Amino acid sequence: MDPIEEIKQTFFQECEELLAELETGLLTLRAGDGDEETVNAVFRAVHSVKGGAGAFALDNLVSFSHVFETVMEEMRSECQSQSRETFDVLLRAADLLVDLVREARGGAVVATERTTLMTTELNNCLAQNAASPASECQSEDQFEPLMEADALGFVPQQIIFDDLDGDIEPTSSGQSAQIWSIVFAPHNDLYATANDAVVLLRELSRLGEIDTVLAMDSLPALDAIEPEHAYFSWTIQLTSDCSEDDIREVFDFVEDECDLEIRRLSNDIQAAPDTDTITPAPNDIDRFDAARSELLGTDPASDALISDTRTATTEAEPDETVETPAITETPQAQQAASPQQSTIRVDLDRVDILINLVGELVINQSMLAQHAGVSGFSKEQGVGTGLDELERLTREIQDSVMAIRAQPVKSVFQRMPRLVREISAQTGKIVRLETEGETTEVDKTVIEKLTDPLTHMIRNAIDHGLETPEQRTAAGKPAEGVVRMSANHRSGRIIIQISDDGAGINRDRVLEIARHKGLISHSEILSHDEIDNLIFKPGFSTAEEVSSISGRGVGMDVVKRSIESLGGRISISSTPGTGSVFTMSLPLTLAVLDGMVITVGDQALIVPLNNVIETLSPRAHKIKYLGPHERVMALRDQHVPLVDLGHLMGLRDHLMEPSGGVCILVENDAGAQIALLVDDILGQRQVVIKSLEQNYRKVDLIAAATILGDGRVALIVDIDAVICSRQSSSDHTIRPLEQTSLAS
Amino acid sequence: MSLRILTVDDSRTIRDMLKLALIQEGFEVAQAVDGEHGLEVLDDCAPEVIITDINMPNMDGFSFIEGVRASEKWRGVPILVLTTESDPEKKKRAKQAGATGWIIKPFNAAKLVDAVRRVAA
């Protein structure tokens, strides 16, 4: 890739980080938790974006970040005490900056009006700020130029890399050559800032021919010399066609650290008879240099007059032959140069290959263990202990590899504050977003697929969940609504909850719609939870009028489906008047699973362990028949449906006698339980998930497949699908009994 | 004339741009991410010219310059500050801290190299 293009990509990457920092910083400040470093970080972020954008001539980005920076600069001293509204404006400005970066990256074009509006808004902020008594004292003179912040005219300058050659050649003496007299007397400061008179004189010699006279009058006796003081001054006669500005530019860096007098002596070279009046002196830099070295060489006490670098370079001047330590890519320099970068970027494909290989390793290891068992190696023998060790190591490798793919949910959570701001602006609802557990880690694939459903749910929570400020006040709640988003780990899964303190689900309305749309029959009696969960049914949408926010043709059923495609579950619980809670439970990884190996007929199947509650041996008197194919099992104080897994999956034609098998009580995330009747339980093991959809096709009731130690393919049962199929096939007959508590 | 140059800037973009411009000129470039880091690597990279940003985390450019000027070994190394035209105040403060000269951002490669050559002894 073109190096410039490469740096540009780095810049965009850096922008992302900077803008995330900017947002976090502003949010912290708005919450009143920021300290000085937060303020600095916020400033740095905008400043760095501007700096980088300037280098690539991204005009829109540069001019807006410039306005942004200028406004913030004005507020800097009181930054921590700004009003919430001001921070809201700054946050929206930050959002615009994000979009401008996106635009620069080739994304959607940002309308000019938006930038103009934002600029005005920022300036208004400042005007209010200036009007507040706190800042009155200092704002007056600063405010005026800001009114024309737009017209500040920060002109970006594109870096041109091909003009490096040439240019610094001595200017040729043209016909219009003039003679300049320059008197140059450095102050002590000039040397203290590592400027060097010799360098300046050399620079001057590039402008034309020079005659230099050294004045040593003020040089004291040797024992009185202060090594760091400036004792010399020079009178230089320069013959050149350059302008006075060109000469001044040479002394640009030192104009405050020296006395400088520049006079034009004549317009004409020929008319310069007064050269004679100048004291004969070394007339070129080399001779001057030699003289200086000679002078200083005899006087060790004044060595310090020569800067260290000067000495260093003169020694190194023969060049090429002198081995200087390479400083660019030495390990120390590299290591030291990146204290923040304790991470490496690895192509995701490579990680996936690794995960796949580890999966094969796990399978191979269990095959090996099985063969060893068959061949009669006991645990006491070396082979047995070696195999145990191998199993432990394999599992550790697997965990470590999985950890590589794990990422904090922060990356998704971070996008939400902006969304909340936008929606609250559109709906006129006042919303506070609270997040918790941002550092909770989950597989990268899961994270990537979470963004859309979460976005949709946040939209819903604000648009449908929260009431308007007026309604809230009327209901005796604070006008500001709260949407909470939390993540945590629970029993090997990640639980993400989105809750709001709105009005809760309007159950009558939901029932009415569901009946109207034929989603449920009119006679059906549903529990509150079941009513709430109706909103996940395809074809259900409560929005009375399609709003621009949530009415995008995507209902909660789509959210549910995308969560389920990740092997996750979603449920809702709602309390009228106090709000709703959506709970999503997702697997931490899509690659492995702890499973219970069972047999049904001659098939080995896997039941995900996190669905299993307990295992029981069924007793005949606990089983009740509700018809030829329906059975329930009494379990302590309730009845659960008993499902013959083999029969359900078509592995056998007739129902199995309960006494001949084992029962596994399983539960889905919605809390529905059933007892699965299977032939036998073989054990528990971690299995590598192989997608059926990718390798074969979607099969009902089956989530995926795996390969067992003996090389057989085992199917992983989709417990939720089993429970749902059970419910939909026999809902009405079972339900009343299910809910009846049996005393005996 | 090859020079060893230390660039101190918290922005990766700017560091990369500086490096690209400088190595095209045949200079050797070492990089530091902030003032503190800059002071740490001085001995390792033995710079002949230093280019530093002002606004950086941990240790800003002013303190970094003061740090270099206070070191026995590297006090004589010319230091150029990267600055924007809009802040003459910063230029002045940098000068007080001991900066040799400045490079106006956004910089142009030729001007950058020119500025480096102007201070390199």
Image: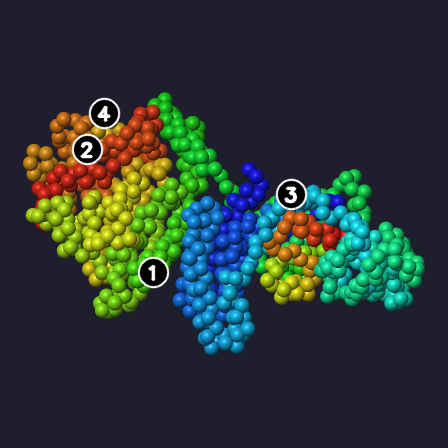
Can you say whether A686 is above or below A270 in the image? Answer: above
| Disc on the earlier residue, 2 or 4 | 4
Quick one: B7 or A72, which is closer to the camera? A72
Location of mark 2 (residue): A645
Label 3 CA crowd tier, 10 Å (few <14, some 14–19, many 20+): few
Q: Chain of mark 3?
A: A
User: What amino acid type should be assigned to the residue bearing mark 4?
Assistant: Asp
| Disc on the earlier residue, 3 or 4 | 3
Mark number for residue A425?
Answer: 1
Tag 3 secondary structure: loop
Location of mark 3 (residue): A162
Can you say whether A515 is above or below A724 in the image? Answer: below
Q: Do the numbered discs 3 and 2 sit on residues whose CB atoms are within 8 Å? A: no
Q: Quadrant of residue A176?
A: bottom right
Location of mark 4 (residue): A602
Label 4 CA crowd tier, 10 Å (few <14, some 14–19, many 20+): few
Label 2 CA crowd tier, 10 Å (few <14, some 14–19, many 20+): many
Compute the Cα span from label 2 to label 4.
Answer: 13 Å
Q: Quadrant of residue A272?
A: bottom right
Measured from the top left, where is residue A411 in percent x and y? 41, 49
Q: Give a yes or no on whether discs 4 and 1 share a subunit.
A: yes
Tell me what residue is drawn at x 28 percent, y 38 percent: A608
Residue furthest top as drawn: A375
Tag 1 secondary structure: helix
Q: Chain of mark 4?
A: A
Tag 2 secondary structure: helix
User: What amino acid type should be assigned to the residue bearing mark 1?
Assistant: Ala
Quick one: A254 or A716, which is closer to the camera? A254
